[in-house]
Image (tube, rainbow, N blue to C red):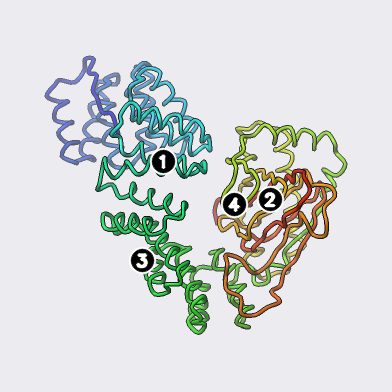
Amino acid sequence: MYQGKGMPIGGPTQSEVQVLASLVQGQKFQDAERKTKKLLKRFPDAIVLYNILSAAQFSQENFTAAAKTLEKLLSINPGFVDGEYNLALAYINLDKSEEAVELLENVVRKKPDMAEAYNNLGAMYLKLNRFDRAVENYRTAVKLMPNFAQALRNLGVALRDLGQLEEAEKCLSKVPLLNPRFAPGHYSLGVVQRGLGKTDKAIASFKTALKLDPKLKEANYELGSIYLERREWEEAIAAFKKAKTIDSNVRVLETLFSAGRNDEVVSGLASLNHEEPRNLRAAAFSAYASHQLDTENTHPFCRKPLDFVSIRRPKSSDGDDAFFADLMEAADGLTVMWERNTTRGGFQTHGNLFDPLWECWAFSRLEEIIRDELDAYQAEHAGSEDFLITQFPNRFKVLGWRVKLMKAGFQKPHIHSGGWISGVFYLKMPNNMKGNEGSIAFSLHGYDYPVTRQNIPGKEHLPAVGDLVFFPSSLFHRTVPFEADEERQCIAFDIVPEAY
């Protein structure tokens, strides 16, 4: 919560300050901003005026202006802890997580009993994929303020992300007792209950959340997923339609397909594919449904995604032992988490390996290799009319993570709906594998779609160390389990558009 405490040190009179404060309290924020700026010309060092001005700017969600105001305030009075906290909040809203963390760490050192600061610090560490620090700060916030429902909910969500579902449930079950009308608390509890297989309790939690907040689209989406699993078609369709998200629009059609209502699937895809040409879940389902129903794939993103799988051997890295050694050393130094969703029997890092904050030359060089090979990949497919090539983003980031699979580990079929092109660079492969063990397998089929027509098109590749694989992010892919008592390590990545 914004801390708008005044520290008048001369300058404007008490009555002048009271007029401005009354304008803010009366939600006349533009008037308050205009009159405060006018007074600041007379009293440019008056801390109280910067407080009022930043409060008015915050209330108008002008966080850039609020940050500049607070930066000026702190240049006048560097030790003003409430100013540091408010500036951290501005940075949070401006997506400046690193800057916010630095300020919040200063705040909790000066005010070790400020539960709200610890809660926000936990949120920033969670955003930076520092789950251990996030949990630590959430726990401190709850210890300082045991009835702090928001912090307790955040702690439960972080524990869930760490795969500690039982502890997350214990934590989240307390939130509705503290604040029965806090819809996100009921929703988060429902997500954990569903993960634990307590489906009936999850449904009750989601319905309670929606009763409190009918616009909570995530709860409708979860309900739709449960009803689909139960083959309760009409209930699933109704819930997905209420969710009104990009994915839920596709889930409606997936439900119709599962129910065998194929005419509705074909007409629905024709409309959805036209309206959402960059919806990658729609692209994936459209490719599969068109094969199963023997119709034309009308989604323009990538009509024949298997044709765009590319196995490459970058010359710039081939045989460079020092590069591989440094890459492995850097990857081994990353925090990994045991995965329970797409990855089974393995670990995965969180955060972006290619973030400049890592300051790792091996990751930087790998990104250069990926970008160079992408240029060649685009050139090879220059004749394509698919959006994958014709609408390839001019500006993009490479988002990477390491995947380490152990004996019998594998990844289930999945897509990367937030990407454009996805890929894998292989660091280590087990020896003594049999047949296709350890392969990466591509297919039009995934997400347990029902199969009515066999011989679904697919491709497999048994990677070697140093292989680089590109494929459309809309294409289902998985890994084949292996029995060798060794590790399979790779760096997976997405090409994520920054702007279309």
Q: Residues within 10 Å of mark 1 (few under 14, many from 20)?
A: many
Q: Which residue is rendered at x = 36% and y = 59% of the image?
A: 203
Labels 4, 2: front one? 2
Q: Nearer the viewer, mark 3 or mark 1?
A: 1
Indicate which disc residue 409 carries: 2
| Placement of the C terminus among the 4 image quadrants | bottom right
Circle 4/circle 1 CB separation < 8 Å: no
Look at label 3 and name its amino acid: Lys
* Residue under numbered circle 1: 156
Label drawn at residue 356: none
Whether label 2 touches label 3, CB < 8 Å: no
Residue 266 sits above or below residue 240 on the image: below
Q: Which corner quadrant holds the N terminus? A: top left
Please name the residue that numbered disc 3 is placed on.
242
- What amino acid is found at the position of numbered circle 2 in the picture? Gly
Does the residue at mark 3 contact the one at mark 4 (Cβ under 8 Å)? no
What SS does tag 2 mark? strand
Q: How far apart are marks 3 and 1 (CA)?
A: 26 Å
Sequence order check, earlier mark of 2 and 1? 1
Residue contact at pointers 3 and 1, CB within 8 angstroms:
no
Q: In which quarter of the image is residue 239?
A: bottom left
Report, in whole angstroms, how far the alpha carbon at label 4 lies from the one at label 1.
29 Å
- Of circles 2 and 3, which is in front? 2
Judge left or right: residue 34 versus residue 467: left
Among all residues in the image, which is located at the extreme right?
319
**Front residue of this view, candidates 126 and 226:** 226
Q: Please give left or right for residue 193 compared with residue 130 in the image.
A: left
Q: Which image quadrant for residue 107? A: top left
Q: x and y percent of residue 31 in the render?
A: 20, 39
| Of callouts 3 and 1, the N-terminal one | 1
Report the residue marked by disc 4: 496
Pick the residue in front: 431 or 26. 431
